[in-house]
Amino acid sequence: MTFEDCVTGIVDFSKYLNQGSVFEKFNCIEFFKNFSINKELGVLTWGDDEVDIAPETLYADATNAPLPDWMTLRQESLANLSFQPTS
């Protein structure tokens, strides 16, 4: 991939194959090959915008750079959530 800052790199999408959920669709090569760029959001999308990957994630994967702090903090916050059953 080539990014706006002219940095290039390779993203290995195979890591998404075992993540389940919406990424299961990547197992269908025809689905995977049929991507587009959502110009409004700046993300790669598949299907009718049902699967997308943020450019920050792709950049980090392609360059081995860390994710931006705001993404890391959000992921940590979500990981610390615990759902309690209500009676």
Image: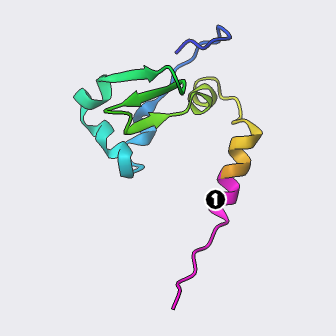
In this rendering, position of residue 3 left or right of residue 26: right
- What residue appears at the point 69 percent right and 55 percent down from the top-left corner? 76
Count of all numbered marks drawn on residues in the image:
1
Tag 1, which secondary structure?
helix
From the top left corner, tell me how far across and down residue 85 is, in percent: 53, 84
As rendered, which of 57 and 87 lies closer to the eye?
Answer: 87
- What residue appears at the point 57 percent right and 81 percent down from the top-left corner? 84
In this rendering, position of residue 28 left or right of residue 43: left
Residue 26 against residue 43 in the figure, above or below = below
Label 1 sits on residue: 78
Q: Give the amino acid type for the residue marked by disc 1 in the picture.
A: Leu
Read off the magenta span. Answer: 75-87
From the top left corner, tell me how far across and down residue 78 is, in percent: 63, 59
Name the main secondary structure of what is drawn in magenta: loop
- What residue appears at the point 30 percent right and 41 percent down from the top-left corner? 25
- Seen as rendered, the residue at the extreme right is 69
Residue 59 against residue 9 in the figure, above or below = below
- What residue appears at the point 64 percent right and 67 percent down from the top-left corner? 81
Residue 29 falls in which quadrant of the image? Answer: top left
